[in-house]
Amino acid sequence: GYVFDYCIEWLTGTGPGNDANRVWRELGALDGKTIANFEMFNTVVDEHGRSVTFYNDPGRLERHLLEISPADARPIRAFCRDLRRFTDTNLYPFLTPPPLQTPRERLATLRAVLPDFVLFWRTAATRMERFAGRFQDPLLRRAFPFIFFQDHEVFPLLPYLFNMASAHHRNAGFPQGGSLGLARSVEERYTSLGGRIDYRARVARILVEDDRAVGVELRGGERHYADHVVSACDGYTTIHGLLDGRYSSPRVDTLFQEMMNRPELVYPGVVSAFVGLDGEFAATERHSTTYLLSDEDAAALPGVLQKSLVVQLRSHYSDGFAPPGKSVVHCTYFSDYAYWKQLRLTDRKAYWARKQEVADFVRVFLERHHPGITAAIEVVDVASPATIERYTGVRGGSILGWKSFTEADDVITGLINKDR
Ligand SMILES: Cc1cc2nc3c(=O)[nH]c(=O)nc-3n(C[C@H](O)[C@H](O)[C@H](O)COP(=O)(O)OP(=O)(O)OC[C@H]3O[C@@H](n4cnc5c(N)ncnc54)[C@H](O)[C@@H]3O)c2cc1C
């Protein structure tokens, strides 16, 4: 009766009156759903039990941070001043991505952005890492990069401020049913319009005639012909798998031959441990916490990349994830795909043993923070980046593909803008 759904932490466009919301409405994605909105993005707790909560309300955040470290008044006030300005701006220019806008649309965007151009430019040019280095308090210095649960490393301040401001406006909530519920709603809308979906139908290759995609061939050899073929899966799989690498271009080669092997440009995978347990957490328990780990804890967690563990009470996000009276907890961390893949290929028993170590660690860790919880645990289910690749086809089990605000972004913009 448990649903272990690891996707969606927040969904932009859950509030009314913006382009992103229009997209979700047209797709039927939010039909009949309630939306959970949280007052804070995340709490970060260090090894000594000190904690900081990233509230979305700039005033509340400022008071909280000043209580933790009055000596850091300058960077605290600077961050909260910027958050206040993002909150006032409340801009979501999403419907047409900038590279696809007509000159007229571009002018309209420019007009909307112009009053806050300096704010956007400055916060896009300031790396979070560098900003966090200004804090004297060791917890704040370490915690700020973990506002989005794990450290996104290359991110500047802008996405943090933008998403916290969105959440404050109740436009970055959690839809009832999570990603499965959202997908089911889109499916329902599609089939109600006459669409058909075939599950368990992996495409082996795209059929091409005279340099035109005319259909697909499934793994079992079954063929389907079509006027248009749209691949919605991983880019590398599409170009180098389904099309045999035949329809490449210099920019595509740069992405999939050079950049893809640079970890600073591509998101890593995650280890994901779901815990189903008998009993409920108090409504006041925070929904999301990142624990910064001691060296000893980090050493016990296989393949951990950032010495941190995210613990989320997923049954606080939506009903339906656990049977009545029970709860779902998700424990997750960024992890190295190559480590897990190699282990799975060469020594399946060792691979299973490492997954068991993750499960054991999670039990002990949760017990430390919620004494007595072990007896209530009914199931622990661990997925590695290799599991995720196996199920989704996403190369390297990467959670989000290319990292934003990197060189890869520039190449992709060129691919859309110039190569069309
Ligand atoms: C842990 C995690 C947390 C996330 N949190 C958020 C969040 O909070 N908010 C947010 O907005 N986004 C979040 N994302 C990102 C979001 O999930 C993705 O951006 C989104 O799912 C991408 O959608 P897509 O349709 O492009 O690709 P996918 O969702 O990857 O869909 C591709 C589909 O193609 C199928 N496929 C692959 N190969 C083949 C083949 N050969 N033949 C047939 N089918 C194939 C796959 O099975 C899959 O169903 C998160 C992602 C992860 C992993």
Image (spheres, rainbow, N blue to C red):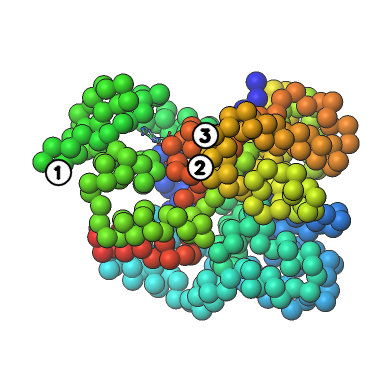
Q: Residues within 10 Å of mark 2 (few under 14, many from 20)?
A: many
Camera-nearest residue between 236 and 149? 236
Q: Give the amino acid type for the residue marked by disc 1 in the picture.
A: Asp
Left or right: 385 with respect to 233?
A: right
Q: Position of residue 43 (x, y in %)?
A: 74, 53
- Does residue 235 appear in this view? yes
Where, quadrant-wise, is the N terminus in this rendering? top right
Residue drawn 86% across the image and 41% down it? 368
Residue drawn 80% across the image and 40% down it? 365
Q: Quadrant of residue 229?
A: top left
Q: Quadrant of residue 133?
A: bottom right
Camera-nearest residue between 362 and 43? 362
Secondary structure under tag 3 reads helix
Q: CA distance from mark 2 to mark 1?
A: 31 Å
- Cβ–Cβ under 8 Å for marks 3 and 1: no
| Dot 2 or dot 3, earlier in sequence | 3
Q: Give the amino acid type for the residue marked by disc 3 in the picture.
A: Leu
Q: Give the amino acid type for the residue marked by disc 2 in the picture.
A: Gly
Q: Nearer the viewer, mark 2 or mark 3?
A: 3
Camera-nearest residue between 359 and 342? 342
Q: CA distance from mark 2 to mark 3?
A: 15 Å
Residue drawn 61% across the image and 47% down it? 335
Camera-nearest residue between 49 and 76? 49
- Is the residue at mark 1 in contact range of ligand 1, meaning its CB lies under 8 Å from it? no
On the image, numbered disc 1 is attached to which residue? Answer: 211
| Dot 3 or dot 1, earlier in sequence | 1
Where, quadrant-wise, is the C terminus in this rendering? bottom left
Q: Which mark is residue 345?
A: 3
Q: Position of residue 382 (x, y in %)?
A: 64, 33
On the image, numbered disc 2 is attached to which residue? Answer: 397
| Dot 2 or dot 1, earlier in sequence | 1
